[in-house]
Image (cartoon, coloured by chain):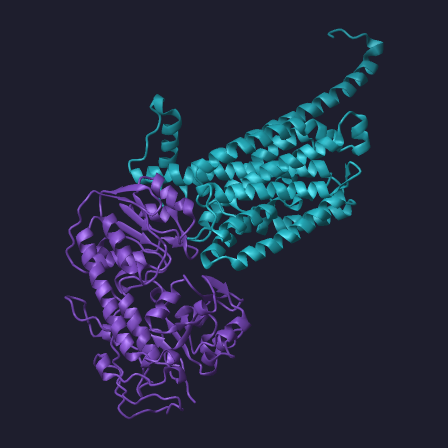
Chain colours: A cyan, B purple
Amino acid sequence: MTTIDAPHEAADAQVDTAMSSPVRATGARRAKVTTLFAALVVAIVVVSLVSASVGQYGIGFGDVAASVAHKVFGPLGVGHASADHFAEATLWQVRMPRVAMSLMVGAALACSGALMQGVFGNPLADPGIVGVSSGAAVGAAAVIAGGINLLGEFTVPAAAFVTGLIAALVVYSLSRAHGRTEVVTLVLTGIAVNAVAGAGLAFCTFFGSQVARDQIVFWQLGSLNGSRWPYVVTVAPLAAFGIVAACAMARRLDLLALGDRSARHLGVDVERLRLAAIVLVAVMAAGAVAFSGVIGFIGLVVPHLIRMVIGPGHRVLIPASVLGGAVLLAGADVVARTAVPYADLPIGMLTALVGGPFFFWQLRRARGRAGGWA
Amino acid sequence: MTDTSTSAAVASARHRGRGHAGRRPRRAAAPIVCLALALAACQVPNSGSGATPVEGSTELPWSQLRPLVDPGGYVGSTTALLPEPDIAPITTNPHPVLPATVTDNQGSKVTVTSDERILALDLYGTLAATVAGLGLGGNLVGRDESTGFPAARSLPVVTSNGHQLNAEAILALHPTVLLTDTTLGPWSVVLQVRAAGVPVVVLPATRTLSTVGSLVGQVAAALGVRAEGNELATRLDDEISAERVQIDAVAPKDPAKRLRVLFLYARGQAGVYYIFGKGSGADSLIDALDGVDVATDAGINGFSPLNAEALAKTRPSVILMMTLGLQSVGGVDGALKLPGVAETPAGQHRRIVDMSDYQVLSFGPLTAQVLDALARALYAPNPVASGPVISPSGGAR
């Protein structure tokens, strides 16, 4: 409108202002979201390159970048493979799988955390409470202590995956009553299952040989040491499937945040959504934990951090958590490898060291708001 | 009653620059001279009669030692030490025939093209010792935590966090061949090294007296030195047979009087205590020492968590332990506080015999010497000399 009648100017101006503030607000938020995603993507690239260039085998950052460029853009003549064939082999057979694994496991765990928090409506939910981690630990320990080797190098991850899934589904089915799932019952059943799994774990630890015991303990502490391309290729489809399905559920999770009843009235099948979410969480978390051992708190910390920046909308939260989880775990892995010379700190220990205090802080914050939502 | 714990051999032998050139008769020496027979009664603290200072004493062959009439009644603990922990190679000039193709213990066909830079890693350090025995010790470029023989001590350690293999440390040494078994993990690291192009030969992990020769043969085949391997295996088998004859001569002939021995594994003070039974290697060791393996008799297979009543039921007269394990529970006093130990005859006589963790069950090229040292500790332990006893592990108690 280029000409405005004078008597209507004031009224129109008011309408204009009223109409333009939501537009401006949405524009501001969109800018924020775009910045966040751009920052996360850049962070992923930088952390990956840094992670690939640190380690006991000295390969400089420039060499790493050149080698990566050569692998990716080789036909264009960009970059060059490392002259030392051991360096090249170390980079592509030892470090790159580790970087890829840390990105994927971080993404899968953060996504499951975001899903759990959405489904339970509680900001303190973490995939561990559903019993996935401890269930997987029991499966791995049983196979290690028993010396079973049916699938070669995949025996332990397969056993961990299966038992993790079973544990999560047992917890879910035990906490259903009259076709509905009480959230509190779910959490309490998870605690009970965790306790039983702990006993099973102690049993396996006690009866294993010295070598088996060391392996079980290190598996429980979580480590990305020994990641290989076959493992990466196995985890990738599970993680990808989980993330895509989670993004598809995002809108319904937003509706669920209004309350079970309201969501039902708005056409969301609450029970089915909960079941689907828990299955996804179980699959992603079990798949991640099966190869890397027990790594906790990523699912708790990352969605919170993202929410502090852009609020609780799931359509942005879930993809952003995926990227944020990847960055966080890859960064933690760099620290795990470089903090103490010639030693590889268990990464589960590091995440717990940071995640534990964070959990306490969240508890205190939530208390002030009657256990509310961020 | 004072505790006496003596070493069957002393490191001073090394101080005197004793090399291992040539083929001297390999007998673990007991340079502490004391011909006083140690019977079940009290030990006199200053047993000056016949005791000469450790420095400058000579090797004592078995013919000059009088074994105990009743080894089961001896009181006090003993540390078994090797006089010469370094490995004597079968030849200083091996001639590898390369490339060598072998089928390893897991059925993979591996071709080794160069012996220049060897890595031999396993839980007991046997493989590195075997490589040294074959004369290729100079080609070792790194070691594991369990390899401690003097020639290898300066090599970089490629394990992290104890016995965990570190792929980058391994690859940083540019090895041309990796020999390992399944006792060190994580297994995926071994696969990473293989994927990086290094030939990896996986050897069997069982260690008993009967695997000594066969392991030497397998390592030699992988490194292309089969002829030297046969020679070394023959030498080791001969040494072991000779040692067993010697042990038969000093051990009690009457089966009823044979020493009842139990191998106890302990680490720290948090309840990590295991009895090593049938198939653990300890049974083979005790059997070779003409002892009665009470754990096997009681039906214990492999590694069994320590149960106080089961231990008391086996009634061992001697408890065999690893030196670092014994230190970790607080020495002999601490070991006597372990559940069930004080109730055994061994506990009541404070009869604990310890030997280096890296030698006692490794069944490598030093097996005959290990048997000899243990036999001396069991059947002819000597009281402490009146002078200062120099022993590398501070065995004097």
**Furthest residue in direction right, as rendered:** A7
Tell me where residue B194 sits by quadrant.
Answer: top left
Residue at (69%, 31%) from the top-left corner?
A: A313
Q: Pick whichever, B21 or B239, lies toward us.
A: B239
Q: Residue at x 53, y 31 (%)?
A: A237
The image shows a total of numbered marks equal to 0
User: In this view of the protein, can residue A307 be seen by the observer?
Assistant: no
**Is B228 on the left-hand or right-hand side of A301?**
left
Q: Quadrant of the rendered structure where residue A262 is?
A: top right
Whole-percent x, y for residue A361 in the image: 68, 49
Question: Does residue A342 lie above or below B263 as drawn?
Answer: above
Q: Which quarter of the picture shows residue A136?
A: top right
The residue depicted at 67 percent of the width and 32 percent of the height is: A276
Q: Position of residue B361 (x, y in %)?
A: 36, 64
Where's residue B295, x and y in %?
A: 45, 69
Instruction: For the N terminus of chain B, give its image quadrant.
Output: bottom left
> Quarter holding the C terminus of chain B?
bottom left
Q: Is residue B279 above or below residue B311?
A: above
Q: In the image, residue B74 lies at what x, y percent?
A: 39, 84
**In the image shown, does A69 or B6 lie closer to the viewer?**
B6
Above or below — where is B57 with respect to A228? Answer: below
Q: Is residue B197 visible?
A: yes
